[in-house]
Amino acid sequence: MIQYPDRQSASIRIDLSTEPFNVGGGLARVRAGLNRAVTAAATSLVRHHFRELVRTNCNEYGLPPAFWPRMIRETSGQATTRGGEVRLPREVAHRYLGGVIEPKNGARALTIPVIAAAYHQRARDISGLRYYPADPRTDGGYVGFLGRPSESGEGPEIYYNLVRRARQDGQKFVLPKPEELETAVRAAIKRFTAKLH
């Protein structure tokens, strides 16, 4: 009945086509209303889950992520003829499934923030940053660093590590548990069918 994101789709799909319902003779408009109700309930649960992650998923500096508020805004629901789907941004599906992250839009490296002042900012928006090349023998796969000369003169203050790619493990916590989604869908079905009688 519920299918989570996979490599082909960044959506949570809900298929009600095989579910037996007493919906007044199975009228198409009643079925369409049921699909909308179920989709709205599932979308609401996913957005609520993301709001909880805003509160609990802070980085090592205690800063709340900018990622989840954007994911809340970009998540939408769409009723279909078979049920519905919660359309997720690709980034959520990527975090759920894991995989390799590579630079986009012509960039040659990913910028990984390493100090609090670098979080929630693009490297190009911080004035005075300079490129410092990495030593491949000692710098663990980094291609370089972005930083500013330190005031003490003892080397640069590094803001970002630069890497060609990063591997991200799948993180199942980024979406509600299947049983939570199933409960929300069943409750929506029950509420909807109760209105028909």
Image (spheres, rainbow, N blue to C red):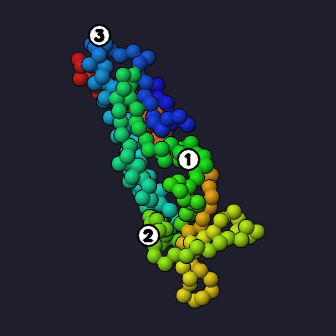
* Residue located 53% across and 45% down the image: 94
Q: Is residue 39 left or right of residue 134?
A: left
* Residue located 41% across and 49% down the image: 71
* Residue located 48% across and 44% down the image: 90
Q: Secondary structure at mark 3?
A: loop
Location of residue 5 in the rendering, given as x and y in whole percent from the top left corner: 51, 36
Q: Is residue 175 left or right of residue 24?
A: right
Q: Residues within 10 Å of mark 2 (few under 14, many from 20)?
A: few
Write down the residue under mark 2: 125
Location of residue 163 in the rendering, given as x and y in whole percent from the top left corner: 62, 61
- Residue nearest the observer in this picture, 33 or 102: 102
Give the mark toward the camera: 1 or 2. 2
Q: Is residue 31 left or right of residue 152?
A: left
> Label 2 sits on what residue type?
Asp
Q: Quadrant of residue 113?
A: bottom right
Write down the residue under mark 1: 171
> Label 3 sits on what residue type?
Gly
The mark found on residue 82 in the picture is none
Q: Residues within 10 Å of mark 3 (few under 14, many from 20)?
A: few
Residue farthest to the bottom?
152
Give the mark toward the camera: 3 or 2. 2
N-term mark: 1 or 2: 2
Write down the residue under mark 3: 25
